[in-house]
Image (cartoon, rainbow, N blue to C red):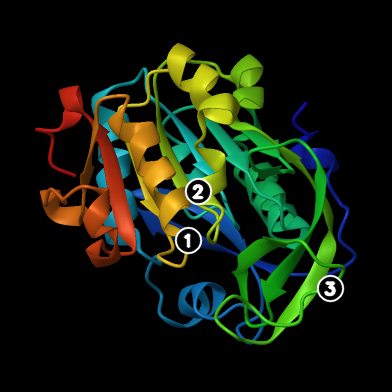
Amino acid sequence: MPDVVLPNSFHSVNETFDCKTVSLMKLKFPICLYDAKTDNPLSSFLLQKGKYFEGDIICRFLQLLLKDERLQLIDIGANIGLWSLPAARLTQVISVEPNLRSLTRLARAVDLGKVSSNITLIHNAVHDVRTTLRMGVYSTNQGHAFLINTTGCEVTPLGEQCNTLSPITTIILNDLLPIMRSRLAIMKVDVEGNEVNIFTDHSAGEFFEHIDIPVVFMEWHRSGLPLAVRRLAEFFYSRNYYTFALHHKKLKKVKDHERWPVNIIFKKSSYAHIKI
């Protein structure tokens, strides 16, 4: 079962951090940050630029929530809450984050912003099996946290310096079904290469059978093995999804996946005409 965290009772990380008020689409809310050296570019950007990180992308999906009040947000790889915190002002949100330090910051912002009733925080990683794994994290980018099969993290998949995080319990996407508050949702996925393991028939098929997910926004990694990438794409193709880049550009099927951009959108055929 998912490890659900209550925001006002979550004080598991013995560190202090700063929270600041930000705004997006006329929504004002607190967000709690790392220091700039520990989390570049996200926290560094929010501390120094005075603008919202990737705000233009996030706003496009918030507009979907405004157009249909039945939609909730499922945020897989929520980090410190860039998507979850503004969405919780509009709808119900499920936020899944395995990095304890990031989840602590998200929980604090939820508590400060008084949106606990609209958001469910889950301290797990989503995978294709239920098990316990260790994690690594890029030492200067806390959002770049990823599952590892070794006892310690030596380098990131791109050969960068990394630190080892505490072990994390994994769940499968089907495990989220009992805590869904709506049968209609959009999904955002940012799991640093593990997306190919989340969307399999045995681990996610039941979820997609019972929940209508018209749009899935995914930051994906080209480094996945071709067979796994094909399996990921076929999971969606077999359920009548098409693949798009941002700005409504339809992408060719999986044989050309090396040409796909980092950010892709899977849209159900009934949503294919909607520009995001």
| Alpha carbon separation for disc pair 1 and 3 | 21 Å
- Above or below residue 4? Residue 167 is below
Image location of residue 258, percent across then percent down: 29, 65
Q: In this view, does 77 lie to the left or right of 250?
A: right
Tell me: 122 left or right of 256: right
1 or 3: tag closer to the N-terminus: 3
Q: What quarter of the picture does the N terminus occupy?
A: top right
What kind of element bears circle 2?
A: helix
Q: Which of 222 and 272 is in front in this view?
A: 222
Give the quarter of the image for residue 122: top right
- Residue for badge 2: 196
Q: What residue type is labelled 3?
A: Gly
Q: Where is residue 34 in the image (x, y as percent from the top left)?
A: 66, 73
Q: Where is residue 244 in the image (x, y as percent from the top left)?
A: 20, 48
The foreground one among 132 and 78 is: 132
Residue located beneath label 3 in the image: 152
Which labelled disc corresponds to residue 199?
none
Asked whether disc 1 touches disc 3, contact meaning CB atoms under 8 Å apart, the reply is no
Name the side, left or right, on which 105 lies relative to 184. Answer: right
The residue tagged 1 is: 224
Kind of residue sitting beneath label 2 = Val
Report the Cα–Cα distance between label 2 and label 3: 22 Å
Residue 134 in percent (x, y) is at 81, 59
Could you tell whether 28 is left or right of 261 in the image? right
Reply above or below: 94 against 252: above
Residue at image x 40%, y 67%? 53
User: What amino acid is found at the position of numbered circle 1 in the picture?
Assistant: Gly
Instruction: Look at the image and tell me whether residue 118 can be seen.
Output: no
